[in-house]
Amino acid sequence: MNQTAFAPWDDPAAKPLIQFRDVTKRFGTFTAIEGLSLDIFEKEFFALLGPSGCGKTTMMRMLAGFEDVTEGQILLNGQDIAPVPPNKRAVNMMFQSYALFPHLSIWDNIAFGLRRDRMSKDAIAARVEEMLRLTRLEKFARRKPHQISGGQRQRVALARSLAKAPKLLLLDEPLGALDKKLRQDTQFELMDIQETTGTTFVIVTHDQEEAMTVASRVAVMDEGKLMQVATPDQIYEAPNSVYVADFIGDVNIIEGKAAQTGDKVTIAWAEGQPDIQGTTATRTFSPGQTCHFAIRPEKVAISADKPDAPNALQGKVLDIAYLGNISTYHVELPTGAVIKAQTANTRRIARRSFTWEDPVWISFSDTAGVLLEH
Amino acid sequence: MRRFALIAIPYFWLLALFLVPFLIVLKISLSDLALARPPYLPQWNFGDGWEALRAFFADLDMENFVFLSEDDLYWRAYISSLRIAVISTVITLLVGFPIAYGIARSPVEWRPTLLMLIILPFWTSFLIRVYAWMGILSKEGLLNQFLLWLGVIGEPLTILNTNTAVYIAIVYTYLPFMILPIYAALDRLDDSLLEAAEDLGCSRIQAFWLVTIPLARNGIIAGCFLVFIPAIGEVIIPSLMGGSGTLMIGKVLWEEFFSNRDWPVASAVAIILLLILIIPIILFQRNEQKQREAEG
Ligand SMILES: Nc1ncnc2c1ncn2[C@@H]1O[C@H](COP(=O)(O)OP(=O)(O)OP(=O)(O)O)[C@@H](O)[C@H]1O
Ligand SMILES: [Mg+2]
């Protein structure tokens, strides 16, 4: 392991591999990407996250060369890529729809890109076999795409895009159709490949856990704009908006009026309820400003007796979601608000401490949540 | 039982419309020319009894087929038909593929109109269209007048009553049979496949040869058979537009039948033509079946 963590985005001297400069993309009158600026660095594993239709595929297609940029520029190694046709870009893309060649066998699909490079027959064969092994498709090499399952097809598409070992690899939902076990294995394979080849990955995913696992940085998008670009832990622990907090993982949002002294903020959020105590190092709220307190369920404790904590609220158990390793308690406060609290299931279910309608206390420290303006 | 009925219908259809006429023609081809009505012997009626039936079969022979193989007119006609059909099929493909490709690549809202334009000529009688071509291609026809007016030629060209006119008319007539199956194949082609090919390092032209053509292959094969099979037996076009040098088996058949009234020889010619055609028809069926399997 390197002593210094991999963080070129914090290094002002680092040269980005890809630069989006104020990129706008319109389809007719519809704006799919709006004034987007972004730097992606060499050897990054960059994840794009966002709801359906927010423009993730469009960004990939602009990088691969299938869509023109309406306004702005995309630079690869400092060069504007607009005039470079797709087949001349050192970029490979795994299509969301896989786009496997139906007339070619799995083997030939994977070899397709290699053949264009005038590699020797033996080198191609070796590389294809390697890719087949990696994606566990050895048994299906001679079949046609319509003779294999959806998950297997996805792996073929992945293998085909990996085969050429490009400088930049674009993966549009590469693992969506795989079962959890295979997906995790493949995620680690991808990270391995990334470490050994130094390829830069841009990956689209709907699965935030996946983004958290593999990515060096995550970009959360909404309607063609970047909401936040940061490392997974920053996105999770310090989202910059309610939207991001809500999109990544589970979160409780409490809205109220702020009163700040130094880095301490008290939030008046409901009549008859104690104010919430929070801290913020980066934001300043004017007195009475609307403020959102966002706290993850796993940071909310649940107990039968009033605990000694900066924030403690009383309520009753409304619902319990048993998820195997953890349980989520939905606790209804007298105001009608529902707060989620998560506990690890270290005991058997029958010996669970709380059940429906039980009066309980929920509590959290003053540093557990984040304060957000919007 | 229901299944049997379902299968029985097409088989009955084939039996009534193909096998029975085929057997009748086969029988005539084995008969001898005679001044009778119908103009061949032997003949057999239901009332004649077994003895007559035996005599009837004894009278059938291969004489007409032997005659066909001895007179090289027939062989030359078969070969010439094959050649004309092959050449016309190739030309039709060369003309039809770009049209089908153009339609498949045109904006979606245009496609129904363009396809309509391809099919539209079918709504007028085939004979009228052939006569129209005669009007265009004749010595004083539109084409010659136009070229003279342009000054490209000094003398009117002789096109009508040559093989060239036959090629033009066959290509024109069967073009839709080439375009429609190729269009259907190209229409199904997913654009992202071409993008994937480009992404993997193909130029546009390479992607065309490596992806578009292989995926349109079945459409191309179907179109070629749909042109080749009827073209080989074409009668009207060589009769009306071909010259004295245009030798096609359909024309020979027509003359044997109507001018010479030699039904047995005409039938023998037809039987041989059918045997020649059965090979491409079987290949065509194979192609269709393979395609269905690939999609299923
Ligand atoms: N060719 C096109 N013409 C018009 N609109 C388009 C076109 N391609 C994409 N769009 C629109 O642009 C927006 C972004 O599309 P995009 O495919 O990038 O979404 P996405 O983020 O990849 O979604 P998903 O997660 O569902 O794949 C969508 O609203 C889509 O309807
Ligand atoms: Mg997409």
Image: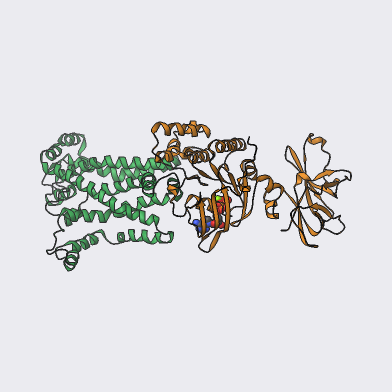
Chain colours: A orange, B green
**Left or right placement of residue B281 versus residue A323 in this view:** left
Q: Which quadrant, please, contains the C terminus of chain A?
A: bottom right
**Left or right placement of residue B189 versus residue A3 in this view:** left
Q: Nearer the viewer, residue B92 or A187?
A: A187
Instruction: Name the spot of residue B288 as percent of width and height, x first.
Output: 36, 43
Instruction: Name the spot of residue B246 as percent of width and height, x first.
Output: 14, 51
**Residue at (53% x, 53% y) in the render:** A58
* Number of numbered discs overlaid on the protein picture: 0
Q: Nearer the viewer, residue B224 or B283?
A: B224
| Among the 4 quarters of the image, the one containing residue A121 | top left
**Residue at (11% x, 63% y) in the render:** B155
Q: Which quadrant, please, contains the N terminus of chain A?
A: top right
Q: Is residue A354 visible?
A: yes
Residue at the front extreme of this rendering: A13
Q: Nearer the viewer, residue A149 or A77?
A: A77
Q: Is residue B190 visible?
A: no
The image shows residue B72, relative to residue B174, as above or below, that is: above
Instruction: Name the spot of residue B51 as percent of width and height, x first.
Output: 18, 34
**Left or right placement of residue A271 versus residue A285 in this view:** right
Instruction: Name the spot of residue B249 as percent of width and height, x first.
Output: 17, 47
